[in-house]
Amino acid sequence: MARSKAETLAWLRTVSGELATATLKRLEETLPWYGDMPPGRRSAVGLVAQAGITSFISWYDDPRSTPWIAADVFGSAPRELLRSVSLQQTLQLIRVVVEVVEERVKDNGDGLREAILLYSREIAFAAADVYARAAEARGLWDARLEALVVDSILSGEPNDELPSRIAALGWHGHGEVCVLVGTTPKMLDVDQLRRTARHVQADVLIGVQGTRLVLVIGRAEPMAAEGDEPRPGGPQLSFLEIAEKLEPGFGPGHLVLGHEVVDLVQASRSARAALAGFAVARAWRNAPRPVLADDLLPERALAGDPLARTTLINRVFRPLADHSSELLTTLWCYLDNGRSLEATARELFVHPNTVRYRLKRVSEVIGYDATGAREAVILQSALILGAIAEPSTPVKRR
């Protein structure tokens, strides 16, 4: 015999405690993750299940209360529950609750079963909405934290909290790090930059500072993400090659890559070099895109960058001075004579082949080829800065 709605409501209120107990028992039997949870969180999940049953009874009494379902059911859950229970697990929880209630009310007419199905649908949508809002809030929090981390790296100020903040962002990079600085495009596609980075086995931190777009790049292990095809095995790309892949995500203008540093905590050193290079890149008319900050050492030194001056002296002048004054003198003469082998040979009273041999030795010692136009600028700048810094090392003329 079919019950009236008032009788059904009275009966539901009578058996609500029994339904809650049966639901918790079924959760332990069918959902392994529920049994593995700490007691406090398991209790919170149980409260959500009980709230769902209670809210259904209220909704059955007045279906117009539908907009408040999410608040009724999930309002009793502690905030950390959203971080420990996934949306998939929440839907499993809803399914178990619905199954238990359906089994208990199956003899009370089709109308009640249809009401349960309709309510379970609303609950599922409400759960999705709750998780979507949480994900949106988390995304905004992550964006603010990422901006804070990038700003700390660019400022170079010591920050004891930097490692923990980096870990909170889920940084997948390991080992060496470089900083890439360019212009911000009109339509910045952060997701595309991250997808490109994943394709080349890298991770990035992204910061926007007005018209500047800053990427902190670290190598990462291949990740199997939906829609991504992991890059096949083989040698890792250099940071310059990674920067070339990321280049389309920047706006027009110069793109400067800082030097490698050992880890993310030391990234401020690479950032200083990249920012200094970006500020003077226009002074090199044919600068490639991207360009290494170390390839802009002369321009940076002229602009007053102490790191560039020190690098030029330590990388060029001192190794030659320590190795052989003959090589240093030959390089001076070669550059002063407009890179003419014959003029250099006449000044040094040697054969041009001797000049060629010495220039080859210079290249072996410092890694720069003096016969190249751009490298000659770098070498000449290094010699001038070295002579200024170490006046006690005169250049001998022969």
Image (tube, rainbow, N blue to C red):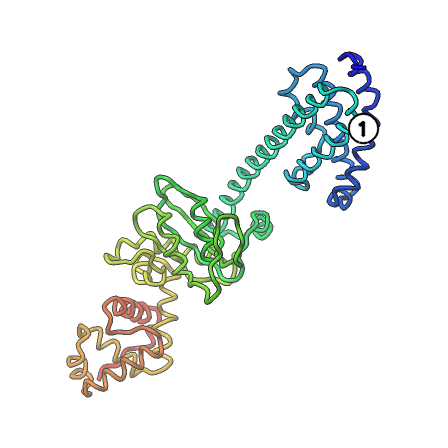
Instruction: State the residue in front, 289 or 106.
Output: 106
327, above or below 237, in the image? below
Instruction: State the residue in front, 180 or 387.
Output: 180
Query: In the image, what residue type sits under mark 1?
Result: Leu
Q: Residue at x 33, y 63 (%)?
A: 295
153, above or below 93, in the image? below
Instruction: State the residue in front, 7 or 257.
Output: 7
Percent x, y of residue 73 = 70, 27
The answer to which quarter of the image holds residue 346 is: bottom left
Q: Residue at x 80, y 27 (%)?
A: 104
Mark 1 nearby-residue class (10 Å; few <14, some 14–19, many ≥20): many
- The quadrant of the image that shows the C terminus is bottom left
What element does badge 1 sit on? Answer: helix
Dot 1 corresponds to which residue? 19
Percent x, y of residue 121 = 64, 27
27, above or below 280, in the image? above
Q: Residue at x 76, y 41 (%)?
A: 30
The furthest residue to the front? 1
Percent x, y of residue 26 = 79, 37
- The quadrant of the image that shows the N terminus is top right
- Left-right relation of 166 to 83: left
Instruction: State the residue in front, 311 or 219.
Output: 219
101, above or below 383, in the image? above
- Left-right relation of 360 to 180: left
Q: Residue at x 56, y 35 (%)?
A: 137
The answer to which quarter of the image holds residue 108 is: top right
Percent x, y of residue 43 = 78, 36
Looking at the image, how many numbered discs can be counted on the residues?
A: 1
